[in-house]
Amino acid sequence: MLKTPSWYDESPCKGRDRLFFSSELRDRMVAKRICQYECPNRTECLDMALRENMTIGVWGGKTGPELARLQNA
């Protein structure tokens, strides 16, 4: 089980799981925009997702398939 990082408390994604884990393309695009334009923790989030091999949801402005490609590169 991954411990919630302290920076998450100040992230605009907190409490928006439905958006950040949606199977709808539109929701994922909205989530990516939130990461890119509103989140001060995007780099930390992306680093954590890559380190922990997360491939479901939007993390650090990347979707699951984008994360998987980065992990396999």
Image (spheres, grey):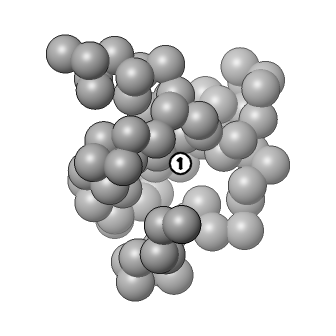
Front-lying residue, 22 or 32 = 22
User: Which residue is tagged 1?
Assistant: 34
Front-lying residue, 21 or 13 = 21
- The residue under the point 79% across, 23% down is 24
**Looking at this rendering, what residue extends furthest in the front direction?**
1
Left or right, residue 69 beside residue 55: left
Q: Provide residue 30's location: percent of width, then percent of height.
A: 64, 36
How many numbered marks, from 0 up?
Answer: 1
In the picture, the quarter occupied by the N terminus is: bottom right
Q: Amino acid at mark 1?
A: Ile
The reply to whether residue 61 is visible in this rendering is no
Q: Is residue 29 above or below residue 65?
A: below
Q: Is residue 56 above or below residue 34?
A: above
In the picture, the quarter occupied by the C terminus is: top left
Q: Provide residue 69's location: percent of width, then percent of height.
A: 34, 16
- The residue under the point 61% across, 28% down is 29
Left or right, residue 35 beside residue 40: right
Q: Provide residue 45's location: percent of width, then percent of height.
A: 36, 56
- The residue under the point 71% across, 19% down is 25
User: In terms of image quadrants, where is residue 13?
Assistant: bottom right
Left or right, residue 64 beside residue 43: right
Q: Provide residue 60's location: percent of width, then percent of height.
A: 39, 46
**Looking at this rendering, what residue extends furthest in the left direction?**
73
Left or right, residue 37 beside residue 73: right
Q: Which element type, helix, strand or loop, lies under badge 1?
A: helix
How many neighbours does mark 1 have within 10 angstroms: few (below 14), some (14-19), or many (20 or more)? some
